[in-house]
Image: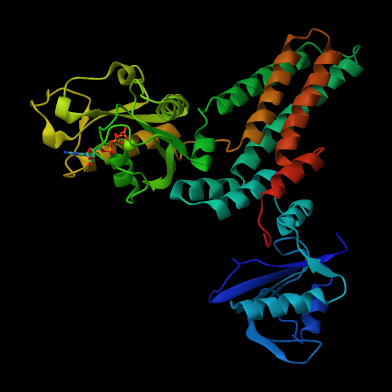
Amino acid sequence: MTEETIFALASAVGRAGIAVIRVSGTKTATALKTLSCVLPLPRKAVRSRFIDPSSGELLDDGLLLWFPAPHSFTGEDVAELHVHGGRAVVDSLLTALSAVAGLRPAEPGEFTRRAFANDKMDLTQAEALADLVDAETRAQQKQALRQMGGALKELYDDWRLRLVQALAHLEAVIDFPDEDLSPEVADKVWGEVSGLERVITDHLNDQGRGERIREGLMVAIVGPPNVGKSSLLNALAQRDAAIVSAIPGTTRDVIEVHMDLGGYAVTLADTAGLRDAGDVIESEGIRRAVQRAAQADLKIVVFDGATYPARDVATVALIDRDTLVVINKADLLPSRKDADTTEQFISVKTGFGMESFLGQLQSLVREKTGANVGTPLTRTRHRKALEECRDALVRARAIDLPELAAEDLRLAAKSLGRLTGRVDVEEVLDVVFRDFCIGK
Ligand SMILES: Nc1nc2c(ncn2[C@@H]2O[C@H](COP(=O)(O)OP(=O)(O)OP(=O)(O)O)[C@@H](O)[C@H]2O)c(=O)[nH]1
Ligand SMILES: [Mg+2]
């Protein structure tokens, strides 16, 4: 257990009804006594006055909770001070706490880091906690909660255990060549290894579902100039994010809007209209538009209803499986549309077709993220470690010498261990906890 006792404001900075100050470490009880608090019964909220030790003045009258080790978030002695969320109240309490010997302000993520160090959670659960705090959509929230509950931890721990067992059996075969262990044991080992290789490969082949939920889906709006791309962005975002005008070539750069689309995080990008540009700025905008279309998870390609069914060839070239084709300005349609078309006819101006378009867009987003199916990995860190693991398993199976194969199995187990934080983790820890806010 670490010597230093840490404290921090755990709730958001700024004026609020209530603020929560958290203290963790061996000096927690001392700190409470310094503020003239009576140590409450464990895990019971009690009303408490907080007194400034230097002046004897009242700092606040609030609630106090006491979580003695090891039954606390960090596994250490922890106290929570629920005080009134005014700047002066919070500042004076933090100042009083920093004056207590052995106490210091917490670094970002330090409470969670201690929880990890004291085996209260593994690294995937710590990451999920950060994701839950950052979650802006329902899908992100659900995914973070599932991961925090140990969904990924259980999966990776199970694979690691199976791998370590296979390795132990292989080592037995190596160490006791004269015993009658092989070949049945060796067969069992390689059966297990190839089974693991298969499940890990399947887990990796998830089209990045978990990462998309966490980071948000990229959707690009592309099409010729003046068809109403910016108008559509504004309608979806429900604000005037992009300039709309009757002059073709109005949008010249990529304009991004982050939004919650039916519970999923989406980054919607409006782009410059595609045409043979008149000047260098516009051609740069068009280059960016095409680039953005190529990077996007989904494209909304917009054509002009006033000139329907004429279509611009450069735009048609961008249509693929992940494209929603939209004919805007349906209010200006010169001819009646064909019945069996996959195009969506809308009018941003009158609102015609907007509801069904939105429904189709939402179901495409849902399809892309495949939410609530299985337990997807959620970060590049997970992907890299699992790829290393799989590669080591593939190498091990291709090697004839059992001693060398065992070395690769050891590497594979190590990759899984790094994933949950059980081996050689220092540098991994710094990356994971760096992204936390203070007080977490
Ligand atoms: N009649 C009609 N006009 C529309 C509709 N949607 C947009 N407009 C008009 O079409 C013009 C162009 O709209 P924008 O949204 O700026 O078009 P854009 O595709 O972003 O154009 P660029 O940025 O130049 O590529 C504006 O005058 C809009 O008011 C619609 O559904 N019906
Ligand atoms: Mg525009």
* Residue at the (66%, 76%) spot, across then down: 90
Q: Quadrant of residue 60?
A: bottom right
Res. 149 visible in picture: no
Counting from the top left corner in percent of width and height, residue 121 is at 70, 51
Q: Nearer the viewer, residue 112 or 258?
A: 258
Q: Quadrant of ligand 1?
A: top left
Residue that sits furthest to the bottom in the current view: 56
* Total numbered circles: 0
User: What residue is rendered at 79% in x and 52% in y?
Assistant: 117
Residue 221 appears at what percent x and percent y?
Answer: 35, 33
On the rendered image, what quadrant is the C terminus found in? Answer: bottom right
Residue at far left of view: 335
Residue 255 vertical placement versus 238 (above, below): above
Q: Which of the pair 434/387 is nearer the observer?
A: 434
Q: Residue at x 88, y 63 (%)?
A: 3
Q: Is residue 413 above or below residue 197?
A: below
